[in-house]
Image: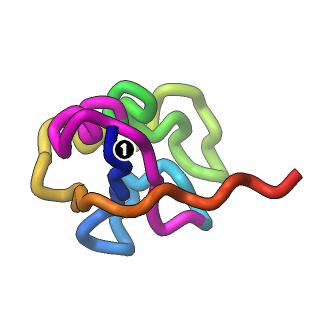
Amino acid sequence: MPWFALRPRDPADPRWPLPGRDRIVLKADGPDTARQKFLEAYPSQPFGSPTVPVPDTGLGSFTADPEALAVEETSEPPAPKE
């Protein structure tokens, strides 16, 4: 099974749920499956803002905007350091 890197097309997109990480790498059957796995894991931004940290009131997800996520095949990521 190949590895895929997902990243927002616009690096400043406020919907990106992983601050400090420019991409996420995961294993999937294909690009569409990789996108679906990402959307299941990160359905929306969980909190409104640092000043109003109310659960489930964040910005919308990437679900309605499939072109906002770039998906490209990549090599296997290095093992995490313990």
Residue 72 sits in quarter: bottom left
Residue 82 point in image, percent of width and height: 88, 51
User: Residue 19: x percent and y percent?
Assistant: 57, 60
Percent across and percent down for residue 76 are 48, 56
Mark 1 crowdedness (10 Å alpha carbons): few <14, some 14-19, many ≥20: some
Residue occupied by mark 1: 59
Picture layout, residue 27 above or below residue 70: above
* SS category of the residue bearing label 1: loop
Compare residues 71 and 30 and report the one nearer the observer.
30
Res 81 quadrant in image: bottom right
Q: Amino acid at mark 1?
A: Leu
Q: Name the foreground residue: 60 vs 73.
A: 73
| Extent of the magenta region | 21-37
Q: What kind of colouring is applied to the model shown? A: rainbow
The residue at the far right in this view is 82
Query: What residue sits 13% from the left and 47% below the top?
Result: 65
Report the residue at 54% width, 58% height from top: 77
Residue occupying image coordinates x 41% and y 62%: 75
The residue located at (33%, 38%) in the rendering is 1
Q: Is residue 81 magenta?
A: no
